[in-house]
Amino acid sequence: MARLDVNRAGELEVFVRVIELGGFSAAARACGMTPSAVSKLVTRLEKRLATRLVNRSTRKLQLTPEGCAFYERGVRVLADLDEAERCASANATPRGRLRVNANVPFGHHFLLPLVPEFLQRHPEVDLDIVLTDEVVDILEQRTDVAVRAGPLKSSSLVARKLGVTRMVIVAAPSYLERHGTPTTPEELQRHNMLGLNYTRATSGWPLHCNGKEHLIVPSGNAQASDGEAVRRLAVAGLGLARLARFQALDDIAAGRLIALLEDCNPGDGEEVHAVFMGQGGYLPLRVRAFLDFLVERVQL
């Protein structure tokens, strides 16, 4: 039986703060303690558990495998306590810092426009938004929710599907006037195809024409780190781009971009998911509120 003189919930909360905030000093400020007291608490916790939870260095803390498992379960336990208190209080509302990571196209076209509405609904939540097309480590980056496009890798993360976005090949009228309009997959090889400078799940642009499958590997004189940058280069007339349709929709409607080879478009799409740590029943109220909001408001 656990000793009654040990505040295990309090220790757990401090440990989780250390990991989420990235160090003893930041956790000490958040918990109203001294860095020395926080360090001693973690050491005492490790001694009681008879295992090392974090490797300490002068630059940062690194979770051990045991520490990672303890952190994940600890987050669930604390969320369960929050949920129990919420159920006992009719006036409970989502509150606290919510760190969200999203790919750049989704961030610009969906997330940022919806921020005012979400914060109006939940004024006690503080959003911390990071936009990048790189896949981040949720635990390492202390992220509550990450929006990812494409197939999900097997992991301990939980996902809620937000929808599927169709892909489209586009170019600016100015580019097509100078270089001509490709009408077959083979003709794409003679054009400047803009790409992304990081590893993608797919290695090329799939097309389906006259019963034949094609996979065109893009080759061009410019690459960019995110889909919005590629869209801007395409609008500027630099070359062809393959974008999520929601990215290009306004440009196509305004005539800034023209959809190409739609007869050969296989109709493939990228699934978009919101991923997070822990099971749905163990989510902090602010995280659950944000996930429900995305599912409600995002229409891909």
Image (cartoon, grey):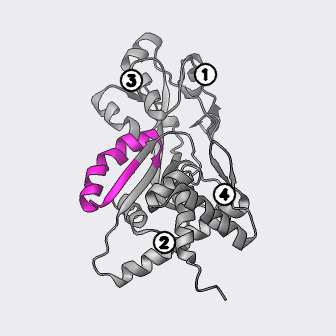
Amino acid on which disc 3 is placed: Val
Residue annotated with mark 3: 235
- Residue 181: give x, y in percent of width and height: 46, 19
**What is the residue that sits farthest to the top in this orientation?**
178
Q: Counting other residues with Cα less than 10 Å from the Cα at mark 3, is it few (<14), some (14-19), or many (20 or more)?
A: many
Query: What residue is rendered at 45% in x and 55% in y?
Result: 29
Q: CA distance from mark 3 to mark 2?
A: 46 Å
Tag 3 near tag 4, CB within 8 Å: no
- Residue 9: give x, y in percent of width and height: 54, 75
| Residue bounds of the magenta highlight | 101-128
Tag 1 near tag 4, CB within 8 Å: no
Amino acid on which disc 1 is placed: Ser
Residue annotated with mark 1: 219
Q: Nearer the viewer, mark 2 or mark 1?
A: 2
Q: Is residue 192 left or right of residue 61?
A: left
Going from N to C along the chain, the mark reached first, 2 or 1, is 2
Q: CA distance from mark 4 to mark 2?
A: 24 Å
Tag 4 near tag 2, CB within 8 Å: no
Q: Quadrant of residue 244?
A: top left
Q: Quadrant of residue 289?
A: bottom left
Q: Is residue 49 left or right of residue 256?
A: right
Determine whether 31 is above or below 105 in the image: below
- Residue 16: give x, y in percent of width and height: 55, 63
Residue annotated with mark 4: 154
Residue annotated with mark 2: 79
Answer yes or no: is residue 227 visible: yes
